[in-house]
Amino acid sequence: MKVQIIDIENPLWCEILQEIRHDIFHKQEYVYLESQRTQSIAQAILITEGENKFFVPYLLRQCDDKLFGGETESDIIDIVSPYGYPGILVSDSASISPEFLKVAMREFISILSSQNICSAFLRLHPILNAGLHEIYESDICNVTGETIGVDLTLSVEEIWMQTKSEYRKVINRHKRSGLEASIVSFEQYFDEFLEAYNETMQRVSAKEIYYFGYEYFSYLLKNLSDNIHLGIVKFENEIACTCLFTECCGIVQSYLSGTRNKFLKLSPDKLLFDHIRYWAKERGNKVFHMGGGYGGAKDGVYNFKAGFSKQTYTFLTLRLITNEEKYNSLVKLRAKHLDISVDHLLNSQYFPTYRYQENG
Protein backbone atom coordinates (compact mmCIF):
# COMPACT_ATOMS: atom_id res chain seq x y z
CA MET A 1 0.00 0.00 0.00
CA LYS A 2 1.40 3.37 -1.08
CA VAL A 3 0.60 6.67 0.67
CA GLN A 4 1.29 10.07 -0.86
CA ILE A 5 0.62 13.56 0.50
CA ILE A 6 -0.09 15.76 -2.50
CA ASP A 7 0.15 19.53 -2.60
CA ILE A 8 -2.15 21.67 -4.72
CA GLU A 9 0.34 22.08 -7.59
CA ASN A 10 1.11 18.38 -7.99
CA PRO A 11 -0.04 17.16 -11.46
CA LEU A 12 -0.96 13.83 -9.87
CA TRP A 13 -4.03 15.56 -8.39
CA CYS A 14 -5.41 16.23 -11.87
CA GLU A 15 -4.47 12.72 -13.07
CA ILE A 16 -6.52 11.16 -10.27
CA LEU A 17 -9.57 13.25 -11.18
CA GLN A 18 -9.28 12.10 -14.79
CA GLU A 19 -9.56 8.50 -13.58
CA ILE A 20 -12.29 8.79 -10.94
CA ARG A 21 -15.78 10.33 -11.07
CA HIS A 22 -15.70 13.50 -8.99
CA ASP A 23 -17.42 16.80 -8.34
CA ILE A 24 -16.27 20.42 -8.57
CA PHE A 25 -15.39 20.35 -4.85
CA HIS A 26 -12.47 17.99 -5.59
CA LYS A 27 -10.88 20.08 -8.33
CA GLN A 28 -7.53 21.73 -7.67
CA GLU A 29 -8.82 25.17 -8.62
CA TYR A 30 -11.72 24.92 -6.19
CA VAL A 31 -9.70 23.58 -3.25
CA TYR A 32 -7.09 26.28 -3.83
CA LEU A 33 -9.81 28.94 -3.80
CA GLU A 34 -11.11 27.60 -0.51
CA SER A 35 -7.61 27.62 0.98
CA GLN A 36 -7.30 31.31 0.11
CA ARG A 37 -10.72 32.15 1.49
CA THR A 38 -10.10 30.35 4.80
CA GLN A 39 -6.37 31.13 5.09
CA SER A 40 -5.50 27.46 5.19
CA ILE A 41 -3.27 25.09 3.21
CA ALA A 42 -4.70 22.87 0.47
CA GLN A 43 -3.54 19.24 0.40
CA ALA A 44 -4.74 15.76 -0.44
CA ILE A 45 -3.83 12.25 0.58
CA LEU A 46 -3.70 9.44 -1.99
CA ILE A 47 -3.61 5.83 -0.87
CA THR A 48 -3.17 3.17 -3.56
CA GLU A 49 -2.93 -0.59 -3.76
CA GLY A 50 -2.96 -1.90 -7.31
CA GLU A 51 -6.09 -0.56 -9.01
CA ASN A 52 -7.57 0.48 -5.67
CA LYS A 53 -7.36 4.22 -5.04
CA PHE A 54 -8.49 6.32 -2.04
CA PHE A 55 -8.17 10.09 -2.46
CA VAL A 56 -9.10 12.82 0.04
CA PRO A 57 -8.67 16.59 -0.53
CA TYR A 58 -8.69 18.81 2.56
CA LEU A 59 -7.61 22.07 4.15
CA LEU A 60 -4.96 22.29 6.87
CA ARG A 61 -5.86 24.81 9.59
CA GLN A 62 -3.78 26.18 12.44
CA CYS A 63 -5.35 25.85 15.90
CA ASP A 64 -4.62 29.51 16.49
CA ASP A 65 -4.34 31.33 19.79
CA LYS A 66 -7.55 33.34 19.41
CA LEU A 67 -9.54 30.18 20.15
CA PHE A 68 -7.81 29.72 23.46
CA GLY A 69 -6.73 33.14 24.65
CA GLY A 70 -3.09 32.57 23.71
CA GLU A 71 -2.65 29.45 25.84
CA THR A 72 -1.88 26.77 23.26
CA GLU A 73 1.00 25.35 21.29
CA SER A 74 1.32 26.99 17.89
CA ASP A 75 2.15 23.81 15.99
CA ILE A 76 -1.18 21.98 16.48
CA ILE A 77 -3.24 21.74 13.32
CA ASP A 78 -6.47 20.11 12.17
CA ILE A 79 -8.13 19.49 8.82
CA VAL A 80 -11.53 20.29 7.36
CA SER A 81 -13.28 19.84 4.02
CA PRO A 82 -13.52 22.69 1.54
CA TYR A 83 -17.00 24.25 1.44
CA GLY A 84 -19.57 21.95 -0.15
CA TYR A 85 -19.56 18.16 -0.44
CA PRO A 86 -16.04 16.90 -1.23
CA GLY A 87 -15.45 13.74 0.82
CA ILE A 88 -13.53 10.69 -0.39
CA LEU A 89 -12.94 9.65 -3.97
CA VAL A 90 -12.44 5.95 -4.61
CA SER A 91 -11.73 4.08 -7.82
CA ASP A 92 -14.27 1.60 -9.20
CA SER A 93 -12.30 -1.37 -7.92
CA ALA A 94 -11.97 0.18 -4.45
CA SER A 95 -15.71 0.83 -4.28
CA ILE A 96 -16.36 -2.92 -4.30
CA SER A 97 -13.52 -3.76 -1.91
CA PRO A 98 -14.68 -3.03 1.67
CA GLU A 99 -11.49 -4.50 3.09
CA PHE A 100 -9.32 -2.06 1.13
CA LEU A 101 -11.53 0.84 2.24
CA LYS A 102 -11.15 -0.19 5.89
CA VAL A 103 -7.38 -0.55 5.63
CA ALA A 104 -7.11 2.74 3.72
CA MET A 105 -9.08 4.54 6.43
CA ARG A 106 -6.77 3.17 9.13
CA GLU A 107 -3.79 4.31 7.08
CA PHE A 108 -5.40 7.72 6.54
CA ILE A 109 -5.92 8.20 10.29
CA SER A 110 -2.36 7.02 10.99
CA ILE A 111 -0.79 9.46 8.53
CA LEU A 112 -2.82 12.37 9.96
CA SER A 113 -1.64 11.51 13.45
CA SER A 114 1.99 11.34 12.31
CA GLN A 115 1.64 14.83 10.79
CA ASN A 116 0.69 16.34 14.17
CA ILE A 117 -2.92 16.72 13.05
CA CYS A 118 -5.23 16.79 16.03
CA SER A 119 -8.58 16.09 14.35
CA ALA A 120 -10.38 15.88 11.03
CA PHE A 121 -13.89 17.00 10.09
CA LEU A 122 -14.81 15.98 6.56
CA ARG A 123 -18.18 16.34 4.84
CA LEU A 124 -18.80 13.39 2.56
CA HIS A 125 -20.49 13.51 -0.82
CA PRO A 126 -24.09 12.23 -0.55
CA ILE A 127 -23.91 10.61 -4.00
CA LEU A 128 -20.28 9.64 -4.51
CA ASN A 129 -19.88 8.40 -0.91
CA ALA A 130 -23.24 6.67 -0.55
CA GLY A 131 -23.09 3.60 1.70
CA LEU A 132 -19.79 4.30 3.46
CA HIS A 133 -21.59 4.27 6.82
CA GLU A 134 -22.23 0.58 6.19
CA ILE A 135 -18.48 -0.03 5.93
CA TYR A 136 -17.09 2.25 8.65
CA GLU A 137 -17.99 2.28 12.33
CA SER A 138 -20.25 5.07 13.59
CA ASP A 139 -17.41 6.65 15.59
CA ILE A 140 -15.64 7.23 12.27
CA CYS A 141 -18.49 7.81 9.81
CA ASN A 142 -21.41 9.74 11.26
CA VAL A 143 -24.91 9.88 9.75
CA THR A 144 -25.44 13.64 9.98
CA GLY A 145 -28.64 14.19 8.03
CA GLU A 146 -30.39 13.87 4.73
CA THR A 147 -30.23 15.72 1.44
CA ILE A 148 -32.59 16.07 -1.51
CA GLY A 149 -31.86 15.32 -5.15
CA VAL A 150 -33.79 15.03 -8.40
CA ASP A 151 -33.27 11.81 -10.34
CA LEU A 152 -32.73 13.13 -13.86
CA THR A 153 -33.03 9.68 -15.40
CA LEU A 154 -36.78 9.92 -14.76
CA SER A 155 -39.03 11.23 -17.48
CA VAL A 156 -40.04 14.89 -17.56
CA GLU A 157 -43.54 13.84 -16.50
CA GLU A 158 -42.26 11.79 -13.55
CA ILE A 159 -40.05 14.65 -12.36
CA TRP A 160 -43.00 17.02 -12.49
CA MET A 161 -45.30 14.63 -10.61
CA GLN A 162 -42.74 14.32 -7.77
CA THR A 163 -43.16 18.05 -7.17
CA LYS A 164 -45.50 19.04 -4.34
CA SER A 165 -48.91 20.11 -5.60
CA GLU A 166 -48.65 23.59 -4.05
CA TYR A 167 -45.27 24.06 -5.79
CA ARG A 168 -46.79 23.07 -9.12
CA LYS A 169 -49.50 25.69 -8.60
CA VAL A 170 -46.95 28.40 -7.77
CA ILE A 171 -44.74 27.47 -10.75
CA ASN A 172 -47.66 27.52 -13.17
CA ARG A 173 -48.92 30.82 -11.74
CA HIS A 174 -45.46 32.36 -12.13
CA LYS A 175 -45.34 31.35 -15.79
CA ARG A 176 -48.77 32.85 -16.42
CA SER A 177 -47.73 36.05 -14.60
CA GLY A 178 -44.74 36.59 -16.85
CA LEU A 179 -41.85 35.44 -14.65
CA GLU A 180 -39.13 33.85 -16.77
CA ALA A 181 -36.34 31.52 -15.65
CA SER A 182 -33.21 31.02 -17.72
CA ILE A 183 -29.51 30.20 -17.70
CA VAL A 184 -27.47 33.29 -18.56
CA SER A 185 -23.86 34.39 -18.87
CA PHE A 186 -22.33 34.62 -15.40
CA GLU A 187 -19.93 37.27 -16.68
CA GLN A 188 -22.76 39.40 -18.08
CA TYR A 189 -24.88 39.20 -14.93
CA PHE A 190 -22.02 39.13 -12.43
CA ASP A 191 -22.94 42.38 -10.65
CA GLU A 192 -26.64 41.51 -10.48
CA PHE A 193 -25.83 38.14 -8.91
CA LEU A 194 -23.50 39.69 -6.34
CA GLU A 195 -26.11 42.30 -5.36
CA ALA A 196 -28.82 39.68 -4.87
CA TYR A 197 -26.47 37.38 -2.96
CA ASN A 198 -25.22 40.07 -0.59
CA GLU A 199 -28.74 41.36 -0.01
CA THR A 200 -29.82 37.85 0.96
CA MET A 201 -26.88 37.37 3.33
CA GLN A 202 -27.75 40.64 5.07
CA ARG A 203 -31.43 39.70 5.28
CA VAL A 204 -30.75 36.36 6.98
CA SER A 205 -27.95 37.77 9.18
CA ALA A 206 -25.52 35.22 7.77
CA LYS A 207 -22.23 34.56 9.49
CA GLU A 208 -19.18 36.29 8.08
CA ILE A 209 -17.88 33.03 6.57
CA TYR A 210 -20.81 33.02 4.12
CA TYR A 211 -20.00 36.45 2.69
CA PHE A 212 -18.16 35.21 -0.39
CA GLY A 213 -16.80 38.41 -1.86
CA TYR A 214 -16.09 39.92 -5.26
CA GLU A 215 -12.65 38.28 -5.58
CA TYR A 216 -14.08 34.85 -4.75
CA PHE A 217 -16.71 34.98 -7.48
CA SER A 218 -14.25 36.53 -9.92
CA TYR A 219 -11.96 33.56 -9.40
CA LEU A 220 -14.83 31.13 -10.04
CA LEU A 221 -15.65 32.93 -13.26
CA LYS A 222 -12.05 32.94 -14.45
CA ASN A 223 -10.93 29.46 -13.39
CA LEU A 224 -14.04 27.25 -13.20
CA SER A 225 -16.31 28.73 -15.85
CA ASP A 226 -16.86 25.31 -17.47
CA ASN A 227 -18.35 24.02 -14.22
CA ILE A 228 -20.32 27.08 -13.11
CA HIS A 229 -23.67 28.25 -14.49
CA LEU A 230 -25.85 31.17 -13.45
CA GLY A 231 -29.61 30.82 -13.32
CA ILE A 232 -31.92 33.81 -12.97
CA VAL A 233 -35.59 34.66 -12.80
CA LYS A 234 -36.71 37.93 -14.38
CA PHE A 235 -39.96 39.77 -13.84
CA GLU A 236 -40.74 42.92 -15.83
CA ASN A 237 -37.05 43.25 -16.78
CA GLU A 238 -35.86 43.06 -13.16
CA ILE A 239 -33.83 40.28 -11.57
CA ALA A 240 -35.98 38.59 -8.92
CA CYS A 241 -33.56 35.85 -7.89
CA THR A 242 -30.29 34.25 -8.97
CA CYS A 243 -28.41 31.06 -8.20
CA LEU A 244 -25.05 29.61 -9.16
CA PHE A 245 -25.15 25.95 -10.14
CA THR A 246 -22.21 23.59 -10.47
CA GLU A 247 -21.98 20.85 -13.10
CA CYS A 248 -19.43 18.04 -13.03
CA CYS A 249 -19.44 14.36 -14.06
CA GLY A 250 -23.21 14.18 -14.46
CA ILE A 251 -23.94 15.93 -11.16
CA VAL A 252 -25.56 19.36 -11.02
CA GLN A 253 -25.70 21.11 -7.65
CA SER A 254 -27.26 24.30 -6.38
CA TYR A 255 -24.41 26.31 -4.91
CA LEU A 256 -24.93 29.93 -3.82
CA SER A 257 -28.10 31.93 -4.38
CA GLY A 258 -29.85 35.20 -3.68
CA THR A 259 -33.37 36.62 -3.87
CA ARG A 260 -34.03 40.35 -3.95
CA ASN A 261 -36.04 41.62 -0.99
CA LYS A 262 -38.56 43.21 -3.33
CA PHE A 263 -39.57 39.80 -4.73
CA LEU A 264 -39.22 37.65 -1.63
CA LYS A 265 -42.96 37.01 -1.15
CA LEU A 266 -43.26 35.73 -4.72
CA SER A 267 -40.85 32.81 -4.10
CA PRO A 268 -39.34 33.14 -7.58
CA ASP A 269 -36.74 30.52 -6.67
CA LYS A 270 -39.42 27.84 -7.07
CA LEU A 271 -39.61 28.68 -10.76
CA LEU A 272 -35.81 28.78 -11.04
CA PHE A 273 -35.26 25.35 -9.45
CA ASP A 274 -38.02 23.89 -11.59
CA HIS A 275 -36.30 25.24 -14.72
CA ILE A 276 -32.88 23.93 -13.70
CA ARG A 277 -34.18 20.36 -13.35
CA TYR A 278 -35.09 20.16 -17.02
CA TRP A 279 -32.08 22.17 -18.19
CA ALA A 280 -29.79 19.73 -16.35
CA LYS A 281 -31.63 16.72 -17.76
CA GLU A 282 -31.40 18.02 -21.33
CA ARG A 283 -27.62 18.29 -20.92
CA GLY A 284 -27.39 14.58 -20.07
CA ASN A 285 -26.76 14.89 -16.32
CA LYS A 286 -27.87 12.11 -13.98
CA VAL A 287 -28.81 13.98 -10.83
CA PHE A 288 -29.64 17.49 -9.68
CA HIS A 289 -28.47 17.54 -6.07
CA MET A 290 -30.13 20.32 -4.08
CA GLY A 291 -28.50 19.58 -0.72
CA GLY A 292 -30.10 19.62 2.71
CA GLY A 293 -30.76 21.86 5.67
CA TYR A 294 -28.28 23.79 7.77
CA GLY A 295 -25.90 21.33 9.42
CA GLY A 296 -27.93 18.41 8.09
CA ALA A 297 -31.11 19.45 9.94
CA LYS A 298 -34.61 19.06 8.56
CA ASP A 299 -35.26 22.76 8.79
CA GLY A 300 -37.03 25.26 6.53
CA VAL A 301 -34.25 25.08 3.94
CA TYR A 302 -34.56 21.29 3.81
CA ASN A 303 -38.35 21.45 3.55
CA PHE A 304 -38.13 23.91 0.65
CA LYS A 305 -35.91 21.51 -1.29
CA ALA A 306 -38.04 18.48 -0.41
CA GLY A 307 -40.91 20.09 -2.32
CA PHE A 308 -39.14 19.30 -5.60
CA SER A 309 -38.38 15.60 -5.21
CA LYS A 310 -38.94 12.46 -3.18
CA GLN A 311 -35.36 11.30 -3.77
CA THR A 312 -33.23 11.52 -0.62
CA TYR A 313 -29.57 10.83 0.11
CA THR A 314 -27.78 10.17 3.37
CA PHE A 315 -25.42 12.97 4.40
CA LEU A 316 -22.34 11.58 6.16
CA THR A 317 -19.44 13.23 7.95
CA LEU A 318 -16.11 11.93 9.16
CA ARG A 319 -15.30 13.08 12.69
CA LEU A 320 -11.85 11.83 13.55
CA ILE A 321 -9.82 12.48 16.67
CA THR A 322 -6.30 11.67 15.53
CA ASN A 323 -4.46 12.78 18.68
CA GLU A 324 -6.69 12.27 21.70
CA GLU A 325 -4.30 13.81 24.24
CA LYS A 326 -3.92 17.07 22.32
CA TYR A 327 -7.61 17.11 21.41
CA ASN A 328 -8.69 16.85 25.06
CA SER A 329 -6.16 19.48 26.05
CA LEU A 330 -7.58 21.91 23.48
CA VAL A 331 -11.15 21.22 24.63
CA LYS A 332 -10.15 22.18 28.20
CA LEU A 333 -8.45 25.35 26.99
CA ARG A 334 -11.49 26.32 24.92
CA ALA A 335 -13.81 25.75 27.89
CA LYS A 336 -11.55 27.88 30.07
CA HIS A 337 -11.42 30.66 27.48
CA LEU A 338 -15.25 30.69 27.14
CA ASP A 339 -15.70 30.29 30.91
CA ILE A 340 -17.98 27.28 30.50
CA SER A 341 -17.64 23.66 31.56
CA VAL A 342 -15.99 20.95 29.49
CA ASP A 343 -19.21 18.92 29.75
CA HIS A 344 -21.16 21.82 28.24
CA LEU A 345 -18.80 21.81 25.26
CA LEU A 346 -18.96 18.06 24.82
CA ASN A 347 -22.76 18.02 25.05
CA SER A 348 -22.97 20.56 22.22
CA GLN A 349 -22.06 17.83 19.70
CA TYR A 350 -19.96 20.46 17.92
CA PHE A 351 -16.93 19.03 16.13
CA PRO A 352 -14.14 19.59 16.68
CA THR A 353 -15.32 20.57 20.14
CA TYR A 354 -12.46 23.02 20.72
CA ARG A 355 -13.78 25.19 17.84
CA TYR A 356 -17.21 25.54 19.45
CA GLN A 357 -18.90 28.92 18.98
CA GLU A 358 -21.55 29.99 21.47
CA ASN A 359 -23.72 31.46 18.69
CA GLY A 360 -23.62 28.20 16.74
Image: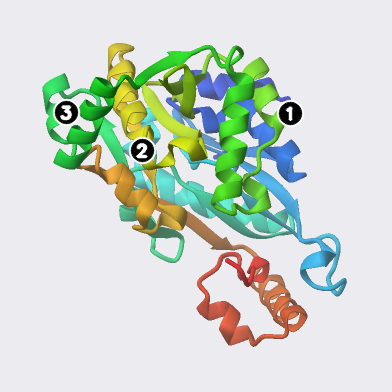
Residue plotted at (59% across, 52% down):
206
Q: CA distance from mark 1 to mark 3?
A: 38 Å
Q: Where is residue 76? Give x, y as percent.
A: 78, 61
Q: Is the C terminus in the top left, top right, bottom left or bottom right quadrant?
A: bottom right
Q: Amino acid at mark 3?
A: Trp
**Number of on-image labels:** 3
Q: Give the residue type at disc 2.
A: Ser
Q: Does residue 324 appear to the left or right of 308 in the view shown?
A: right
Picture quadrant of residue 77: bottom right
What SS does tag 2 mark? loop
SS class, disc 1: helix
Q: Nearer the viewer, mark 1 or mark 2?
A: 2
**Disc 3 packing (10 Å; few <14; some 14–19; many ≥20):** some
Q: Place residue 343 in its image quadrant.
A: bottom right
Residue 258 visible in the current orientation: yes
Q: Secondary structure at mark 3?
A: helix
Tell me the residue that label 3 is attached to: 160
Quick one: label 2, few (<14), some, or many (20+) residues within 10 Å? some
Q: Nearer the viewer, residue 264 or 215?
A: 264
**Can residue 127 be seen?**
no
Disc 3 + disc 2, Cβ < 8 Å? no
Which circle's residue, 1 or 2, is located before the other in the chain?
A: 1
Identity of the residue drawn at 24% across and 34% down? 170
Residue labelled with disc 1: 215
x and y percentages locating residue 65 in the rendered image = 84, 66
Residue beneath label 2, please?
267
